[in-house]
Amino acid sequence: MTTTSEIQAPLPQPHAPAYGPALRTLRAVALPTQLALAGCLFSGVPVPGAVLLGGKLLLLVLLGAEAYVWSRLRRLGPSRRQALARLVPERVARYVAHEARILASLVRWVVRRPHGVGEADGVFPHARDQAAMMYGLTFVCVAETVALSFLLARWPVVHAVVLVVDVYTVLFVLGMHAAAVTRPHVLAGGVLRIRQAAHVDIHLPVARIASVRRASLFTHAKKAGELNLPIGSQTSITLELTEPVNAPKLLGTPRLVRVIRLHADDPKSLYDAVNQARTAPVSASQDAD
């Protein structure tokens, strides 16, 4: 089972880090310094100009050192992705990629360009039953943003920080729904692509599906070896697999599962398509005989 290049499989990790003690020390000093300066500025604590200038220079030195190490790695042969993996921890890269996919989904939603549906044998949307809840949550977030803007108007710095956080929260909630809309389940070439929002994207060969059944469930107890992907608290399709497959978590932690429960707006169509894909090779061989 693999993931698409956009979703990103676990970044290749080197046997040894690409940076030495000097760069590690520079990171350990520069990053906390930037956080401390930002905290002082946001809270209104006066910071001498020389300290601010020193903080900026320290950040520029760190960025220059990172760029230098990256360019050296590229000259040694690794691809851009491999070179980046030598510098950025996999968990950090996965988190940033997830946030980027959320924002990209908003654009896809607006221009009506679903992801990964080209040359598909079947496309199965699954976001319909969560739409009302997501729109309601978005309305609550917008109302909170407006209310806090009035309440914090007397504290400009706090108002600006909270406004940025609130606006991003609104975009994140809409982006989660947009990701579900623009990333449907897809069946193509004997592979069922199972997705949920921007954090689950599994390529499951239908040959690994031992059985598929329609079963509407509204409660899902967490059990080892089972993956539940409810939409609006509901799953409608249960897949039992012939062997465990890896369905990594958001930050790349391995997770072996033998049962996958998912939902589709039209579960019968998904059920029929998966069954047909599972039996197609058998039927073809029988016809040949």
Image (cartoon, rainbow, N blue to C red):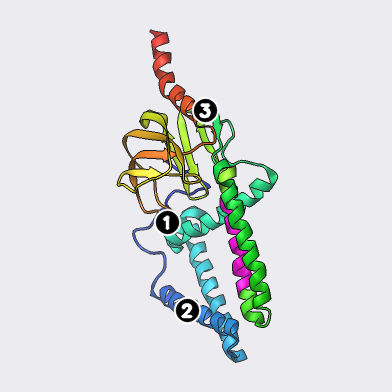
Against 185, residue 173 (above or below) is: below
Residue 289: say if magenta. Answer: no
Instruction: Give the residue pinned by disc 3.
Output: 269
Assess disc 3: are there few (<14), some (14-19) or many (≥20) residues with their C-alpha within 10 Å of its C-alpha: some
Disc marking residue 251: 1
Please say whether residue 76 is visible from this viewpoint.
no
Rendered residue at 47%/56% (across/down): 94
Instruction: Give the residue pinned by disc 2.
Output: 32
Q: Position of residue 7 (x, y in %)?
A: 50, 48
Residue 168: say if magenta. Answer: yes
**Given the image, on which type of amino acid does mark 2 rest?**
Pro
**Given the image, on which type of amino acid does mark 3 rest?**
Ser
Viewer-nearest of labels 3 and 1? 3
Rendered residue at 59%/46% (across/down): 131
| SS assignment at label 3 | helix
Rendered residue at 46%/22% (across/down): 276
Q: Tell me where the magenta segment starts and ends, as one range.
A: 162-176
